[in-house]
Image (cartoon, rainbow, N blue to C red):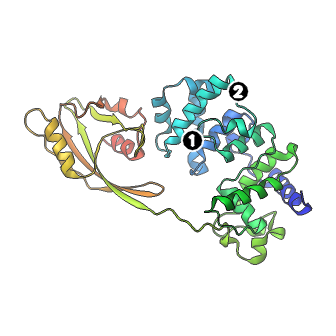
Amino acid sequence: MSEALSELSQRVVRWQRSHGRHDLPWQRTRDPYHVWLSEVMLQQTQVVTVMAYFERFLQRFAQVQDLAQAPLDEVLALWSGLGYYSRARNLHACAQQVVSRFGGQFPFTEAELQTLPGIGPSTAAAIASICFSQRAAILDGNVKRVLSRALGFEGDLASSQQEKLLWQQAREVLPAAQDMPTYTQGVMDLGATVCISRQPRCGVCPLSSMCVAHAQNRAEAYPVKTRKLKRTSQSLWLLCASNASGQVWLRQRPVPGVWAGLYCFELFDDPEALTSHVLASSQGAAPVLAHQAPFKHVLTHKDLHLHAVRCVMEAPLSHAGRWFALEEALQLGLPAPIKTMLAQW
């Protein structure tokens, strides 16, 4: 390792020990179950949001064996509102494989960790480095920003080839094994609290005197990524049906698809399809349909325009759903807007 790269890693280590975060619950342990759980939850999700979910998961699933033995529906219910529900399904599958393949103990190498569902290269590196002091390089969004600015890496990270080059440089920066847990946590914390996307706090950054982007006064030009995902929108009509007993009709969504694996009202692409379905399901006189004001639910790359239509009926609406008491429904894995609607029912 060059002297400059060695100095970069040591500055991160020293900064983490004196100025980094030490109060987050997953930072007070080197238990791979806790670190893995936090890493999965933190993907595309703010720390402040993850905190409560992390604590609730550990209260219910204290060990990986508890998570592996739980029904998937219960896992999805606890995950409800956190988004990216494929993470929850992979979380459950991963726990089961840790138990069945590794006797309930997480493997300590990057290669073996990446054979588990939902664990990619960066998550595997985080577990291996933080929990087992392996010299493994993470490259999440925060770390890409820190390293591309510090090293002046101008490759377009929309290109997999360029991302591999940055990953190679990330490995060259790594300190000795004994410093790996501190370095890995430090480089993530630096990106989360100091080397932020807009208006980075260069005045308090331990890397500022050696940072290429800071010397160029172009911090916000890094990292380079030209390809942007196109934002889309979709309109959906929700058949919010209840019966005379106050039960609500819900069905589990198919996989894959929007809200896959979660319980939801019957969904339709247009109001005509909804009306036709109600008429076909009705026994006797058609129920009165009450159209509610539409509202927007924002996903990462899509806006959902939701149109709720309420009605009271007794007949089953599909072979895939059933009637639930309201209290029972609120314990299911529900999409965030459906959970909000039922809480206000």
Looking at the rendered image, the disc whose residue lies closer to the viewer, 2 or 1, is 2
- The residue indicated by pointer 1 is 52
Q: Name the side, left or right, on which 269 lies relative to 77.
A: left
| Image vertical order of residue 90 relative to residue 2, above or below | above
Q: Position of residue 277 (x, y in %)?
A: 19, 41
Label of residue 92 in the image: none
Within 10 Å of disc 1 (Cα), the crowding (few <14, some 14-19, many 20+) is few
Q: Is residue 300 visible?
A: yes
Residue closest to the eye, 86 or 63? 86
| Three-letter residue code for mark 2 | Gln
Q: Is residue 232 above or below residue 59?
A: below
Task: Please tell me which residue lies in front, 19 or 105.
Answer: 105
Q: Is residue 192 among what the camera can see? A: no
Residue projecting furthest to the right: 3
For the residues marked 2 and 1, what is the alpha-carbon distance in whole angstroms? 25 Å
Q: Label 2 neighbourhood size at 10 Å, few (<14), some (14-19), many (20+)?
A: some
Secondary structure found at label 2: loop
Q: Position of residue 193 (x, y in %)?
A: 69, 58
- Three-letter code, disc 1: Ala
Q: Is residue 137 above or below residue 74?
A: below
Q: Residue at x 70, y 31 (%)?
A: 106
Q: Which mark is residue 105?
A: 2
Instruction: Name the secondary structure under disc 1.
Output: helix
